[in-house]
Image (spheres, rainbow, N blue to C red):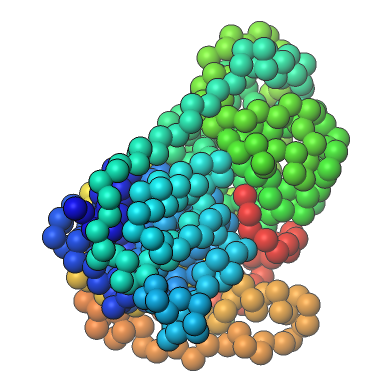
Amino acid sequence: MPTVASVIVSMLESAGVDRAFCVSGESYLALLNELESRATIDVVTCRQEGGAGMMAVADAKLTGRPGVCMVSRGPGAANAAIGVLAAQQDTVPLLLLVGQVESTLLRRDAFQEVDYSKFFSGTAKWTAELNDPRRVHDVMSRALHIAQSGTPGPVVIALPEDILALEADMAQAPVWRPSRDSVDQSTLEEIAALVRKAERPLIIAGGDVANPAARAALYAAAMAWQIPVLCSFRRYDLFPNAHPLFAGELGFFNKPHHIARYHESDLVISVGTRLGDLTTQGYTFPRSPNPAQPLVHVYRDPAMIGVNFTPDIGVVCSAERFLRAFADMHPKAGPDRSRWILELGRFRAEIAELQRAEAPDGVAFGNVVLEMGQYVKPDAIVSMDAGISAAMLYRHYNWTPPQLLLTPIAGTMGWGIPGAVAAALRFPDRQIICMIGDGGLLMGGMELAVAAERKLPITIILANNKSYGAIRLNLEREYPGRQTATVLHNPDFQQLSAAFGCKTYQIINDDEIASVLASAFSTRALTLVEVRTSLQVALAKLQPAAVVSDASV
């Protein structure tokens, strides 16, 4: 008879899981034993559960399959909560497997016991406790189904340590398969009729487009119908940025006259996005609840359609399937949109424009971004931490698929290193770059140990301005001259990174930018480039048009 632990591993294998991230704990030893016995799933040993969670989320973003994070009870699960939040906000399938106290101790305030259904009630799609070995098949099957269905997200399974080694029955639960989605021909014709009449249409593309097939379908649909494409918050990599039909990103850096012009659109086709508050500029574009222009909302989860906006046409369908069907239609000649396309292209150019600057307090980081462009390869994956340093690259660089912008929509600080490690493990032959600030590095930087252990050739660009720069920007806007809790006392990053085995470089003045970047990017090894950056220039150049809170997409 198989054990509960062996059934869990078998079901993960059947779901296509080939890697799991963990911080080990005595509460799930039987599962670790089974994983080592089989050696079919790569177990990545992390140094902190938050890093393990972020790696699992990043891996799920890259594969489309469930990311798996394994942690011990109590403190381990609490640390991993950041990964659960990131998975929920970024709409990523995640399984968090948590070792739990023995079943006989449950609900008796045992050492490190936590009721995870209460703890994760606001972030996890489903939380279960496997306290009966006879239920392992149906609990795991349901977990895999919920994590991947509708709007993908995190599921938490608590595993009492005495249950894992018990025998389970032989019954096999079916492997989860996605339901077939479709859009009927009459609905397509109805949408096509709206497009043929529209003089100023827009496509808003979101996270469900973030896979190669959907990106290709988006490009084909935009080209076939000649509709400009706006990407949702932090999704610059969905459409070629240098293309005339690319209209930019809906996020922090839109200017008031941009938003005013978007309001003049006469059709919005929203594909693969929940239309959260950052993308919609605080639910003002489109206008909530009744948009000023016809709205077509295409999303795979019916629960998300009609929540904040009343669409004229709602389509429950994956972005890829809808866009392929829409592109395959035969567009009839419509209005001349050349002026509309040209004007929106100018808006993108306004946001992307970047000029060299001089600074009294360090290197203007934009000067580094300008020089970096020539080194970013066509297949690069760039893991960006939260903060103003990362924002400069995704704002000013012309992203072109298949390049990937691996950034946390949730604004998860400390993401940069774990995300880069996950990417390098998954795609060892692609260029992996990490953009991170000094605040973010010390939140997730201990995962450099994993990068060193696995000999991962990641190039890390560290912007060191001795500040939580994004917080400082907002603090000074609201309370001019204040800086409490934003000034950082940093270690020697050269010595710190060298201790992990990094090849290290430093840029202190503009004259060093070209030569240092040339050397760093020619090195295929774990590499860190510390840039002593100007805080004054960053605060002046990165003023967002509006500040809103949540980062849902």
Q: Is residue 305 left or right of residue 166?
A: right
Res 225 → quadrant: top right
Residue under the point 67% across and 57% down:
252
Q: Which is more toward the observer, 91 or 74?
A: 74
The answer, for residue 179, to whether it is visible in the render is yes
The answer, for residue 99, to whether it is visible in the render is no
**With respect to residue 330, does 254 lie above or below?**
below
- Residue 88: give x, y in percent of width and height: 55, 56
- Residue 101: give x, y in percent of width and height: 39, 77
Q: Which is more toward the observer, 537 or 425?
A: 425
- Residue 366: give x, y in percent of width and height: 52, 64
Q: How many marks?
A: 0
Res 23 → quadrant: bottom left
Q: Is residue 539 left or right of residue 418?
A: right
Q: Which is more toward the observer, 269 or 436?
A: 269
Res 467 → quadrant: bottom right
**With respect to residue 238, does 350 lie above or below?**
below
Residue under the point 69% across and 23% down:
338
- Residue 377: give x, y in percent of width and height: 34, 47
Residue under the point 49% across and 56% down:
154
Residue under the point 67% across and 61% down:
550
